Image (spheres, rainbow, N blue to C red):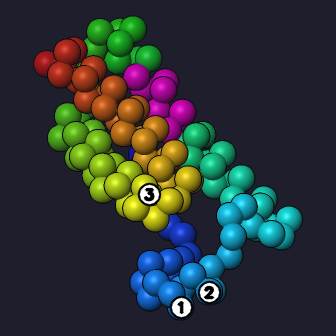
C-alpha cells in the first residue's frame, strides 16, 4: 500500500518572498541533509516493497485476489504527484512517485494478463 509523502514548503506561493526564505538544496545543515537523503531512500524502499507482489503475480500466473480497480487508481493518482514534483523541483517526490507509478503499473499489467 502506498503512503502520501508530505513536505513543508512555501515555494512558488509568493515568488519573490518565498525565494528569500527558501533553504538551499542540499540543505546547509547536517540534519537537513540527512532528512533529504532519508526521503530519497524512502522514495526507493517504499515502491521496492511492492516487487514481491509483482513477482508473485507473474511467477504464479495468477492475480485473481488482486483488485484491478485499486491498483489502477493508485497508478493514476501517481501522475499528478509526478507533475507536482517536477513543477516544484522536488527530487524525493519525483523519485518516489515515478517508482510508485512503475510498480503500480506493473501490478495493473499483471492483473490484466492473469486476472480472472
Front one among 22 and 76: 22
Mark sitting on residue 20: 2
Q: Which residue is mark 3?
A: 85
Front one among 9 and 65: 9
Q: Which residues are magenta?
A: 47-54
Lower position in the chain sequence, tag 3 or tag 2 = 2
Mark 1 vs mark 3: in front: 1
Front one among 60 and 46: 46
Quick one: quadrant of the N terminus?
A: top left
Q: Quadrant of residue 107?
A: top left
Using a 10 Å C-alpha cutoff, classify the residue at mark 2 as few (fewer than 14 neighbours), some (14 to 19) or many (20 or more).
few
3D distance between C-alphas at marks 3 and 2: 21 Å
Q: Is residue 49 left or right of residue 12?
A: right
Judged by its main secondary structure, the magenta piece is helix
Residue 59 rendering spot, x and y as whole percentages: 39, 8
- Is residue 49 rendered magenta in the image? yes
Q: Which residue is mark 1?
A: 17
Mark 2 and 1 residues: CB-CB less than 8 Å, in contact?
A: yes
Amino acid at each position: 500500500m502506498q503512503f502520501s509523502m508530505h513536505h513543508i514548503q512555501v515555494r512558488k506561493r509568493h515568488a519573490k518572498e518565498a525565494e528569500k526564505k527558501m533553504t538551499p538544496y542540499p540543505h546547509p545543515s547536517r540534519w537537513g541533509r540527512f532528512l533529504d537523503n532519508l526521503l530519497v531512500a524512502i522514495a526507493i524502499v517504499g515502491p521496492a516493497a511492492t516487487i514481491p507482489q509483482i513477482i508473485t503475480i507473474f511467477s504464479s500466473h495468477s492475480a485473481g485476489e488482486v483488485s484491478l480497480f485499486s491498483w489502477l487508481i493508485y497508478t493514476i493518482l501517481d501522475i499528478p504527484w509526478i507533475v507536482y514534483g517536477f513543477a516544484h523541483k522536488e527530487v524525493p517526490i519525483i523519485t518516489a512517485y515515478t517508482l510508485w507509478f512503475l510498480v503500480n503499473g506493473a501490478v495493473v499489467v499483471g492483473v490484466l494478463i492473469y486476472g480472472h
